Structure formats: C-alpha cells, structure tokens
Image (cartoon, rainbow, N blue to C red):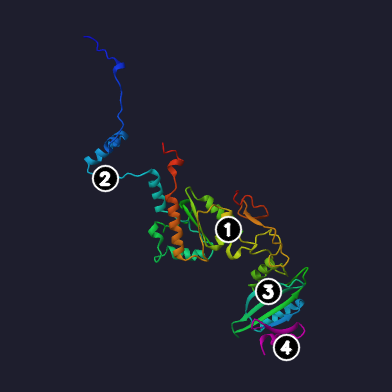
Amino acid sequence: MDPVTIDTTKIRTTKRKPETALEKLEDTGMINTILAAKDREGFILLTTIDQFINWGRLSSLWPVTSGLACCAIEMMAVSMAHHDIARFGMEVFRASPRQADLMFVAGTVTKRMAPRVKQLYEMMAEPKWVISVGSCANTGGPYHESYCVLKGVDNIIPVDVYIPGCPPRPEAWLYGIIQLRQKIKNEGYGVKWGLNK
Amino acid sequence: MNSAEELKYLLPASVISVGVQTNKPLAVIKKEDILQVAEKVKEMGFDNLSVITGVDREDRIEVIYNFFSYKKKQNLVLKAILDRTSPSIDSVVSFWKVADWLERETYDLVGIKFNGHPNLKRILLPEGWMGHPLRKDYDMSIEQFVTVGEDGEDIVSTDGSNLLRGE
C-alpha cells in the first residue's frame, strides 16, 4: 500500500471571524452548554462575576451587634417591624464580629472605647464595611471640644457611609443603607483578582 | 422652717450660713465638721444622698452634697468650701454607702481628696490619666489616648500612633 503523503504546505488553516450571534457563542464554547440546557428544557442566566459576587454581598449584609450610645436605640427601631431592615437581608445582627461584615458605629466613641471599637473592626473578616451613624461618630458632634471623646470614628477605622443626625431618623438609616448597597454594587472584584483576562 | 434652717438650729456652730440653691434649702458648713453634720443630717431623716459634686471657683473649690428624704419629701443641699491648692474633706461613706462611688467620681473629675475613703481611685477615667478634667486649669492642649494592654488594662499615653489611622 502506498503511503499517503500529505503536503502540509498546501493546507491553509483559516479561522473565520465569528459574525452571527450563534457563531460567537460557538467560538466561546458556550454553545454546548446552551444545547445541553435546551435538551433538558432548562434556562440559562448570563451575568458577570462582579455583578454576581456583589449581588450576593449586598443582599445579606450582617451587622455586628454593637451600640455605643443613643443611636443604638434608633438601630433597634430600624431593625424592628416598622422600618424592617429584613427587607435588605440585614436582620441577622451577629453577636460575634467574626460572622459579621457590616459595622454600625452607632454613638459616641469615647477615648476609652476607641481601642475596643478598633479591635472589633479588626476582628471582622474581609470583606467588611463601616457605617458611621450620628454626629458623635461622624465628627464628635456635641462633644467635639471634650477631653474624652474621639473627634470622629474615621480617625481610627475607615468609614464607607456617614449618616448625619442626632440621632438619625430610621428613614435616614435606610437611606444610608441604600447608599452602601449602591457602593457595593459598583465594586470591581474581577479586575482586582485578575479575572478580566 | 426649712431643712437648712433646722440644721442651723441644731448645729449653730457648724453651719456658717443658710440660703437657697435651685429652689432647694442650702446650708454652707465648715469643712472640719462634715462628719458631725452628716450624722445630724442622717438623724433628720435624709436617707438618700443623690449627688456629690465639686465646683472649681478658681480661688476656692466647693464640694456640694444633695440630699433627699423619702419620708419627709424634703431636699437639702450642703456646701463646704475647700482650699484651692490641696482640697480635702472627710469621707461620708460610713453614713451613706452610695458616697463610695460618688466621692470617687468627684475625686476623678475635680480632684478632691476624701479622707478615710476605703478605695479612693479613679472611677470614670482610666488610671494614669493626667489632670482632673473639671478643673479650670485642666490642660486641653494635651491630647491623651487610651490603648488596651495585654491583660485588658487601659494604658494612657499622649502617643496615639497605634490607635489612629496613618494617612
């Protein structure tokens, strides 16, 4: 039998640029997934990793149970049925900072409490966010000239959202929470982790 | 006759003057006779010592006791004038147990020494705090910070570098 000789120089490997949507899908290899789903009459949801992770994070922010002064009373009002932060998946106030990813600094941060607040923040696992609530936590408020009160909790820990008020109404809390959700929604983790290649 | 006048009637040598302070009967007493006066005030039925506080008047320091009687529904305010340089007065813990913490608070914030107090140390501020903050000459320009030591104790220093965020 004669050996078949193939002249490899005559073969031109051409890859057509994908034009139609189906071709583009074929190009990514996703067509198999879609065909498999079609076989089983299932559905497919397309999203980005960023959107998916951020959606997961902002939908179940668990705050740590820590109240420093009268703002903590408003925090209780926010979590009760009338204003109901369970709508945001936030009703689970955790007793341990290890299980929480949000910290409300609700009240006056005195010099003596400051290292403890910082320690609580450092004990929280990443990712973590901080909402500073009320005039005292924002700037020292009425105690700005005091010898024993820190002039703003952002002197010791980074703060994401400031809610003004003395103490802020529960509606202001809800607005602050929505602002934080907006902020989390726009965070880009895929780029940070190198998933954009 | 209000309670201050009654006290002056009972102890004419110890009460310097009587008057009214915020609608309550006031008796200014000699600081040496505080134990005598306290015994008499207790006998008069003032079972509740509401407040002990101190006022820095720059040339003198006043220590003020507010009493209330649940039986007679009466108020009484005692005031004693102390030295500015080394304010000290006898403790009334033996008559009212609540004076323990109230005197510690007054010692902490105004710096009045209460002789005979069983445990006279700071109650609100941590040990090692410099100065007594309700004195007029308290130095507000020195900022003091508190950090937590290894055993959970408070450490006071003017250096906030391990507490404050570096920018």
CA–CA distance in space, label 1 to label 3:
43 Å
Q: Residue furthest bottom?
A: B1
Q: Are marks 4 and 3 in contact (CB under 8 Å)?
A: no
Label 2: which residue?
A43
CA–CA distance in space, label 4 to label 3:
24 Å
Q: Which residues are magenta?
A: B1-24
Q: Look at the numbered disc 2 and give the secondary structure of its residue.
A: loop
Query: Residue placed at 39% from the left, 57% from the top?
Result: A88
Q: Chain of mark 2?
A: A
Q: Chain of mark 4?
A: B
Quadrant of the drawing holding the C terminus of chain A: top left
The amino acid at mark 3 is: Ser
1 vs 4, front mark = 1
Can you give x and y, in whole percent of width and height, for residue A141 in the image?
A: 58, 63
CA–CA distance in space, label 2 to label 4:
96 Å
The amino acid at mark 2 is: Phe
